[in-house]
Image (tube, rainbow, N blue to C red):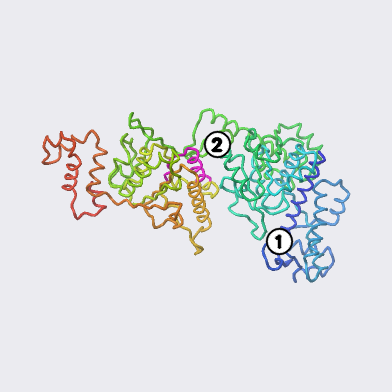
Amino acid sequence: MDPIADRITRHLLRRIRRLAVLDLYAHATGAGLLNSRQIEDEKTTGTIWSISTKGLGMLAGDRTSARRLVARALKCGPATEDDQEEDNTKTADPWTLAVAEAGKATRTEAASKTQGNHRETQLMLGLLRDFPLQPNPVHVAMALLIARSVGARHADLGALREVLQRPNPVVMLKIPVSGFERQFGLMLEDSLIAPFWASLKDIAGGSALSAHFRESRTEKLRRKVITASGRASASVSDRTLRRQLSTALLGEAVPVVIADETSVSVRPQFSAAADIVFEFTGFDQALIAELLHVCCGMPPRVSLDRMKTMTLDPAHICLDDLALAVRPGRSLGAILEALVSLAAEHSEEEDHDDESDKTGRWNRSTKTSVKGKTKVISVDIIQPETLATGKTTGTVTSNAGAVSGASSTFRVSPTLRVETLSGYGEAQGWALDLKADLPLWREGAIGWDQMSTKMLLSGPPGTGKTTYARALCNSLEVPLIVSSVASWLEPGYLGDVLKRMSAVFETAREHSPCIVFIDELDAIGSRGGGQGKRHDEYWTTVITRLLELLDGAMKTEGVIVVGATNLPGKIDPALLRSGRLERHVMIPPPDVQALAGILAHHLGSDLAAVLATAPGQSETHIKDPSPRAPNIAGACRNAISPDMTNEGRQAHV
């Protein structure tokens, strides 16, 4: 192994061992062998361990009986004295050396932190450290991958140290192994890579690199680290990626880490921003042999000779496969056979993905398309219709189209515009003002912040909120991006939900100026405010993300946001504050005059024939188009009773 890679490997294994020892102490505390408290009673200052009364009782006899009692309390078996003596005669591997060095550091740390019964506490901690700690194969594999990528890039640790000691270094690691990005994020959070506990913030405002809802060890003092995912940024445009990187670099002085597990070349934006880039080809047989040596004590030469007789392609192994195959007590043959089977399965999946990509097949149930190994979230975009050609470019589901209140899908009339709508009141005026302001904004005469660009439409089902969005698209002559809270929540898992939300607004920024229409906004609910609402933390995160996206849309010129809801009272008040959906327009059920306009629009060229069937209509009225709306209004008045409710009017019509 390269000397630099060897030093980095031993350093990372020491950190892994240290966390394993801390977890063992926490387990012993739960078993009643140790007492723990925070320094100065502050959660983030560190932990002090001291022996408990139960633990003192176990030390009354000789060492062998004490070890037996501790093993029973922990529900596990320690290594015997003979095993330890035999281990000392073996050739030291990286893990053994890391155990010895981490043990010295941990004993020193424990001795300085414990109070009262110092000698007994140190005896108990020594007994606990006698218990074998099975190396985590995924952590060990990550340590080997990172160490080799560093060793391949830098022969001078001094230069590397100089870069890492800067206030805001930008470091990129590109290792094409499935699962690398998530595991790298997890290890950053748990202080297994850097000498501090990290709190990760995604560069695009998406889910953390670790895919964690929140950090698991809340008592730790953490430093903020901005992260970027090569896999997540694969579908992001160059312009958007440049903006995200510049925002991160011009913000507060914190480290920026880019993790990329894709097999494509490094994007130029990442290369330009990174102070240092580490690359490695991924798993090979030599690395697998070293992994088995560290985790299972198997000599590397034996593992390599065995792999030569098998059809094992390490390039198709992912990190999760190691957790499945490298199990305690398994023989070398069993481990390698499991890896061969898993690698072959991945190879077949990749071939299937390639075929799907060639045919351009879409997975309509999840609205994702397969492109190589990257899943790209699909967002529905409707282009405005041109009045000159009357060409329609898509379909739209309209509540106003079915006056009974049921949704129906139809081809929209080419004349559908805000100017021709009826019954929208203030919403129509808002749209016309926006139409007048857009040319001025394009010319630079007014700023985007001087315009009203966000609105919430509310009203009963069937009042035409979706039709309004389509008409606004045509009137403003800008694309319409259609989404809904129901489609966001479809995956259920918080990380996927946040990604779908972010994808909508990311697409809007790429197609600005445009309109984002968010249907069923009431489904996002309101935050519980700490009052015991079920899954309150989940919904708080979702609403907080939407607030961030709305603010971001306000700061990004060219994005108009229209929300729609049947139940405005269920929406979190923060979404309706200034800078978000600050304009709220209620659309009531249509009155007689509005019904006349709606019928005139949908009847189109059939209007004259329908009017001819109305009682008391003369040929003059039929041929003269000017009084057509009054004629329809009269027919509506005759058909609808004045004392009928709004719901009854809709049902009757």
Q: Is residue 505 left or right of residue 622?
A: right
Q: What residue type is labelled 2?
A: Ser
Q: In which quarter of the image is the N terminus?
A: top right
Q: Residue 296 occupies which quadrant of the picture? A: top right
In percent of width and height, residue 229 lies at 61, 42
In the image, residue 592 above or below residue 415: below
Give the SS element for disc 2.
loop
Residue bearing mark 2? 237
In percent of width and height, residue 555 lies at 50, 47
Q: Residue 482 occupies which quadrant of the picture? A: top left
Give the SS element for disc 1.
helix
Q: Which residue is drawn at 57% across and 30% down?
A: 354
Q: Is residue 586 left or right of residue 482?
A: left
In the image, residue 283 above or below residue 449: above
Residue bearing mark 1? 26
Which secondary structure dominates the residues rendered in magenta? helix
Q: Is residue 539 left or right of residue 318?
A: left
Q: What residue type is labelled 1?
A: Ala
Judging depth in this view, the residue of 558 and 635 nearest the camera is 558
In percent of width and height, residue 2 lies at 81, 38
Q: Which of marks 1 and 2 is in front?
A: 2
Q: Which residue is drawn at 17% across and 48% down?
A: 637
Q: Give the range drawn in magenta.
A: 499-517
Mark 2, Cα crowd under 10 Å, few <14 / some 14-19 / many 20+, is few
Q: Residue 7 occupies which quadrant of the picture? A: top right
Label located before the other in sequence (1 or 2): 1
Q: Which residue is drawn at 73% across and 58% down?
A: 22
Mark 1, Cα crowd under 10 Å, few <14 / some 14-19 / many 20+, is some
Residue 345 in sight in this render: no
On whether residue 501 falls in the magenta region, the answer is yes
Judging depth in this view, the residue of 417 and 81 nearest the camera is 417
On whether residue 196 falls in the magenta region, the answer is no
